């Protein structure tokens, strides 16, 4: 029995050895497939180091650019605040100018209205003066006619006076002549 056990063991061992070596071979094959050569490993490690170096450079560049961006954003914020102040100042100045222009426009309208009123008064005054000048010319003409008439009357009166004086003188001379012939009878 012991020999039959031994033969059974050796058969099982042989099978186990066969199965075990197959398993080991399979595992070794799997490990070979899963593993890489030292050269490939060194290349991958070198690439990883290069990638880490590039990553560090990119990170440093990103940090540097982020600082620039933050600075630029700060500048933009300052410029936006300055622009807002200038915009408010411009709007205030514009509003002030609009108000001043409105006041000037109102003032100009009042002055234009006043000028128009003065022009109307001047036209009325001119009409009155023209009427007065016409009346004065008419009165001067009438005065000249009256003066001429008076002058004529004075001349006529002077002539009449001279004629009366001449007649009186002639009559007086005749009276003396007749007086001497007739006695003077008192009345």
Image (cartoon, rainbow, N blue to C red):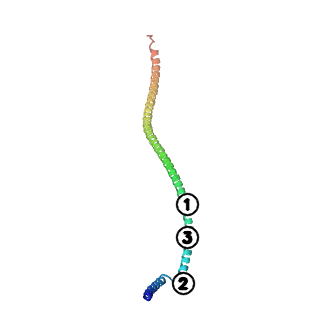
**C-alpha separation, residue under disc 3 versus residue under disc 2:** 30 Å
User: Measured from the top left, where is residue 83 in percent x and y?
Assistant: 53, 57
Mark 2 vs 1: CB contact within 8 A = no
- In this view, 151 is above or below 126: above
**C-alpha separation, residue under disc 2 versus residue under disc 1:** 52 Å
Residue at left offset 54%, top offset 84%: 38
Q: Mark 2 or mark 1: which comes first in sequence?
A: 2
Q: Which mark is residue 74?
A: 1
- In this view, 104 is above or below 66: above
- Asked which quadrant contains residue 128, the reply is top left
Residue at left offset 46%, top offset 42%: 110
In the image, farthest residue toward the top: 186
Residue underneath mark 2: 38
User: Measured from the top left, where is residue 182 in percent x and y?
Assistant: 44, 13
Q: Mark 1 or mark 3: which comes first in sequence?
A: 3
**Mark 1: few/some/many CA within 10 Å (<14, 14-19, 20+):** few
**Mark 3: few/some/many CA within 10 Å (<14, 14-19, 20+):** few
- Asked which quadrant contains residue 167, the reply is top left
**Mark 2: few/some/many CA within 10 Å (<14, 14-19, 20+):** few
Q: Which mark is residue 59?
A: 3
Q: Mark 2 against mark 1, which lies toward the viewer?
A: 2
User: Measured from the top left, where is residue 23 in percent x and y?
Assistant: 45, 84
- In this view, 148 is above or below 176: below
Mark 1: which secondary structure? Answer: helix
- Judging depth in this view, the residue of 1 and 102 nearest the camera is 1
Q: Mark 3 or mark 2: which comes first in sequence?
A: 2
Mark 3: which secondary structure? Answer: helix
């Amino acid at each position: 029995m012991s020999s039959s056990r031994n033969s059974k063991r050796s058969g099982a061992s042989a099978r186990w050895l066969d199965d075990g070596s197959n398993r080991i071979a399979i595992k070794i094959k799997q490990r070979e497939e899963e593993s890489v050569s030292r050269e490939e490993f060194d290349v991958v490690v070198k690439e990883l180091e290069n990638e880490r170096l590039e990553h560090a450079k990119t990170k440093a560049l990103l940090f540097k650019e982020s600082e620039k961006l933050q600075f630029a954003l700060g500048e933009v914020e300052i410029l936006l605040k300055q622009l807002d102040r200038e915009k408010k100042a411009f709007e205030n100045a514009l509003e002030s100018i609009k108000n001043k222009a409105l006041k000037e426009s109102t003032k100009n309208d009042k002055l234009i209205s006043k000028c128009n009123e003065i022009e109307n008064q001047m036209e009325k005054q001119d009409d009155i003066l023209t009427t007065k000048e016409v009346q004065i010319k008419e009165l001067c003409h009438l005065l000249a006619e009256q003066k001429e008439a008076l002058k004529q009357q004075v001349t006529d009166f002077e002539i009449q006076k001279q004629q009366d004086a001449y007649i009186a003188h002639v009559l007086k001379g005749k009276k003396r002549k007749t007086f001497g012939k007739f006695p003077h009878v008192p009345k």
